[in-house]
Image (spheres, rainbow, N blue to C red):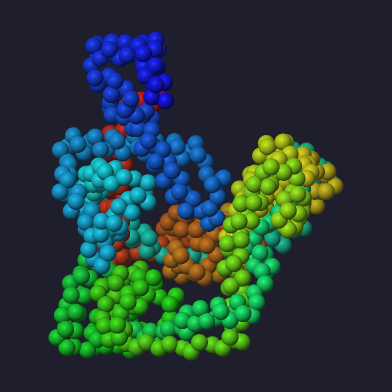
Amino acid sequence: MLQDIRENAQGTIAKIIIGLLIVSLSIWGMDAIVGGFSGEPEVATVNGEDITEREFLRIVQMESQRRLAGMERPDPAMLNDDQIRKDVLDSLIQEQVLIQDARAQGLALNDADIDALITQMPQFQVDGQFNRDRFVASVRNLGMGVGEFREAMRKQYVVNQIRAGIMQSGLVADENAAQLLRIQNQTRSFRVVEVPASAVSDEIEITDADIETFYQENSAAFQQPEQVDAAYITLSLGALAEKIEITQEELEAYYEQRADDLAREERRASHILVEDDADAEQTLADIRERLQAGESFADLAKEFSVDTVSAKEGGDLGYAGRGVYDEAFEEALFALEEGEVSGPVKTSFGVHLIRLDDVRRSEVPPLAEIEQQLRNELARERAQEKYAEVRAELADSAYAADDLAGPAEELGLEVREATGVTRNGGQAPFDHPGLVRQLFSEDVLEGGYNTELIDVGDNVSVVARVREYREAQQLALEEVQDDIRKSLRARKTRELLAERADAIIAGLEEGQSLDALGAGDWKEFEDQARNGADVDQRIVQTAFSLARPDDGAPSYGSAMVPNGVAVVALDAVNEGTTEEGDAELDQLRSFLASLEGQREYAAYQQYLRNRAEVSRP
């Protein structure tokens, strides 16, 4: 080999390459050679600065994983890759604009600042101390190197400083907030009379000509959608587990292995819960100081705990095993020694101090009592290993097969059939959008191939193929005429009810009585709020949409209700009240200020984006 290298190095091709390198060096210098090999392709340039393809693809992958994690049933086939790439590129361009703006304003972090931030982040700590191994592992799980993570922090921190500064500057006039709250708290007094649908039923006549005309004018609405009949194979962990036989010896060994778990441990806890607000840290510090001074935990729970139920019992929560409390609460509780009090534990309810009062363990139940439960557990454990193996075999076999009979026979599975599956799906498992999309794909529908193996649930996978395809068909008039008749009758009923309501309102405005109009009796509602539960919301919405009564004359309106139409007479508008210091007013004022801050920051972002010079290859 060395001789070959030596001979090639003396050849004509090698001399040409060396000659080109010498020319490049003499004209452009060494940077032309090094840069040419080290430069990264870019996906966009913002004010002369590149967004690299590597960074772009990494964020695309992270965004895809994020969207999958947000799905109830994660399915990569449901992702719109083009939309994700567009969204990511737009966000990276916007981010670059903001980073450049922060730099122009002189905002920057040095290495010591970044180190301080990283060491204070809880996700990188073990027992309250920074742990480098956890830090490196966490960063790698994000698909980043340590250097990349530090640089991302450097950029994002200064951008967030500008964001926070602008968003916190949002202001709202006190009177505006008060006026909005008064409107929200406003109540209205009104009367209602309902006209039932039966009042106009005798006036309705739907002829065959009406039905045929509607059918012709709306023919597109009376089509049977394209359908397929499908064959499919379902592979499930449960079905595999049912086929696994567990011997008595295996069951007894598993019972001995699970003995510690089967002896359920329960812990009796007491806690003091405080609200997670600006004063929480100081409040808990005061409580711990008084505990150390010898005060009773129970007395302090009665004084400070916002969990009023347990506070009456001195904070006592009774006995509970695992799986009862919030995860953070449970982790802290089961780490305590008897009589020990935890540090602050934050949950969605607030911040807790937890004391472990007692530990008790139940006896291991006899094997006879839980034999079936353990047999099922052991079978599922063994099926789990087999499921992954069979799934891989089924995926490979179905991909290469011309039908499903071969793979089914090979793996001892059953071929089933489903009929009438449309592009909107069908009965399970064809209620899974990813499987339906595959079924109607060009390769499967026209090419005659099997679908890919699709995971339609936890440990449930399906592969399918089209048996028969039926194009969309126009339904005959005879098949839909009853539905058309019902639809026309309902439409005509609404029209006549609306006319009847308008006639009643016109008569009332002229001074006629309900008796004279043959409209029944008023039902009165006093001081009704917008969210009143004892009145149909359609009536409430109408009442709150009407103009204020003028000189004692009611305002009238109508609302369709399930069994007819309601005529509404608005008699009075009762203004809501507000008081300075009202918690609801303070919350609304803060909310409106936050919205204004967000609006101002969005406008600032758009201003920077409009000024930026952006090019995309």
- Left or right? Give the position of 250 relative to 616: right
Please identify the quarter of the rendering in which residue 239 is found: bottom right
Percent coordinates x, y for residue 267 in the rendering: 38, 84
> For this rendering, which residue is in front, 472 or 578?
472
Image check: 259 left or right of 295?
right
Q: Residue at x 30, y 57 (%)?
A: 134
268 shown above or below 40: below
Residue 508 visible? The answer is no
Which quadrant does the C terminus fall into?
A: top left
Q: Residue at x 25, y 45 (%)?
A: 150
Q: Position of residue 263 (x, y in %)?
A: 47, 84
The percent position of residue 598, horizontal first and vertical second, equals 30, 47
User: What percent of the width, then of the height, locates residue 199?
Assistant: 71, 61
Q: Is residue 293 visible?
A: yes
Query: Residue extending furthest front?
Result: 3
Identify which residue is drawn at 31% across, 33% down. Answer: 609
